Amino acid sequence: MRALVEVVVWWAMLTGLTVVFISSVSPAELLIATLAALGGAVTARRMRLAAYGHVEGDRGALRALVALPGSVVRGMVVLVVALAADPGAGGSVRRIRLRPGADAGWAGTLLAASPDTCVIGVPRDDEVVVHALRPKAGPLEKAVARPDGAR
């Protein structure tokens, strides 16, 4: 109910502002204004929720942050070498099971910061799918991934 009230309030404000700023309102302009305001209202609510998001698990975060600068430099080298040596090389797609207590949000953000790694999916809270140009896991990936054989 609170979500509906919030969207209606945003919609009313945005529609009102649009009508005030248009000198003479035709029926077509009013229809477009109300529909656009509805989209803006839903977006405003989603943005507010995203702005107040919480980071859940922080296990391995410090180790991953320490590994981030080296991983970025290493990723740039891997990217330049891959482009110079074989621009058509595709890299590999792999699933990274995260350590218990690690959050896919911050772990995926850190993994995506490296130039040779692209996060292409987060199928579950404890798993991230990446496309990487390097065949083996780097220090950042090792910091957030479960140890080999762990379930």
Image: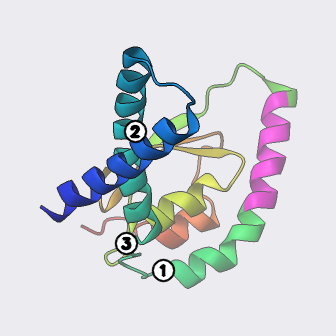
Residue under label 2: 37
Q: Secondary structure at mark 1?
A: loop
Residue under label 3: 99
Cα gap from disc 2 to disc 3, whole angstroms: 43 Å
Image point (61%, 33%), residue name: 91
Amino acid at pointer 2: Ala
Image point (77%, 22%), residue name: 87
Considering only vertical position in the picture, is 146 above or below 112?
below
Nearest the eye: 112 or 7: 7
Image depth: mark 1 or mark 2 in front:
2
Magenta residue span: 72-83
Image point (19%, 54%), residue name: 4
Residue under label 1: 60
Mark 2 or mark 3: which comes first in sequence?
Answer: 2
- In what quadrant of the picture does the N terminus appear? bottom left
Contact flag, marks 3 and 1 (Cβ < 8 Å): yes
Image point (31%, 75%), residue name: 100
Cα gap from disc 3 to disc 1, whole angstroms: 8 Å
Camera sees residue 122: no
